[in-house]
Image: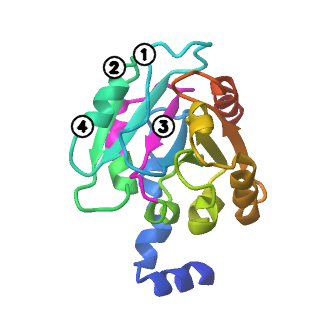
Amino acid sequence: MREEVRGFCEILGLDPCYLANEASSSRSLAVGADSVAIGKVIAGTVGRVTMQPVLGGHRIVDICWSASSSRTSRDADRIRATGAPAVQLNTGTGCHLEADMIARGLAELAPADGGVVMIENVGNLVCPAMFDLGERAKVAILSVTESDDKPLEYPHMFRASALMVLNKIDLLPHVDFDMQAAIANARQVNPAIDVVAGSARSGEGLGDWYGWIASRS
């Protein structure tokens, strides 16, 4: 085990063997051997993202969804209404998903080869940053209804993410949110982070989001 992993675990009081090996169970599954897993962490309350049954544009690949919540199945129900298969993973009192939960979800989803599995983690920006679920990339979704200094308040999450999605930009005329400041703050903690801005309600920017997914597939 690398010394930096051991030291990190000692500081946080984590079991180093558990943390270092946690993602192996989801990576080793045979289902969807050529599929891509992308983890999403959404700042704020889970279940407030708008999903439209007709998204427009072109469907690039089959997408499966693994959604997390502490108790209910409402997130998965909303996603299924769009026509995408989904599995609800309830974390109970836990503050994040774990790899064994993803392994169970993948077994139920049975994604097709070459598809994309979206993992929606619990909506807190601390714990999910520290656990490897076997995903190819983490995506942090920041709504413009929040503060543009979130990347500085939660640097570990934005440092661990390959992409920051600025969502709900249709509300920009009504909120005090500086998009350029948000991007600068994210790149202060992670100079390599990609940025996509869009609105799930209006459809603006969805083409950029689809293109980013395709580039990772």
Q: Quadrant of residue 195?
A: top right
Residue 114: say if magenta: yes
Name the residue beneath numbered marker 3.
Answer: 118
Neighbourhood count class around disc 2 (C-alpha, 10 Å): few under 14, some 14–19, many 20 upward: few
Comparing marks 2 and 3, which lies closer to the viewer? 2
Q: Quadrant of residue 106?
A: top left
The picture places residue 149, in percent across and down from the top left corner, at 63, 61
Say the numbered circle drawn on residue 81: 2
Q: On the rendered image, what quadrant is the C terminus found in?
A: top right
Query: Which label's residue is closer to the chain start, 1 or 2?
Result: 1
126 lies above or below 199: below
Query: Which label's residue is closer to the chain start, 2 or 3?
Result: 2
Tell me the SS state at disc 1.
loop
- Residue located 52% across and 62% down the image: 129
Asked if the residue at tag 1 contacts the one at tag 3, i.e. Cβ–Cβ closer than 8 Å, the answer is no
The picture places residue 137, in percent across and down from the top left corner, at 60, 47
Name the residue beneath numbered marker 1.
Answer: 53
Q: On the rendered image, what quadrant is the N terminus found in?
A: bottom right
> Which colour style is shown?
rainbow
Asked if the residue at tag 3 contacts the one at tag 2, i.e. Cβ–Cβ closer than 8 Å, the answer is no
Tell me the SS state at disc 3.
strand
- Residue range highlighted in magenta: 103-124
Q: What residue type is disc 4 on?
A: Ser
Query: Which label's residue is closer to the chain start, 4 or 1?
Result: 1
128 lies above or below 210: below
Asked if the residue at tag 1 contacts the one at tag 4, i.e. Cβ–Cβ closer than 8 Å, the answer is no
Name the residue beneath numbered marker 4.
Answer: 73
Q: CA distance from mark 3 to mark 1?
A: 17 Å
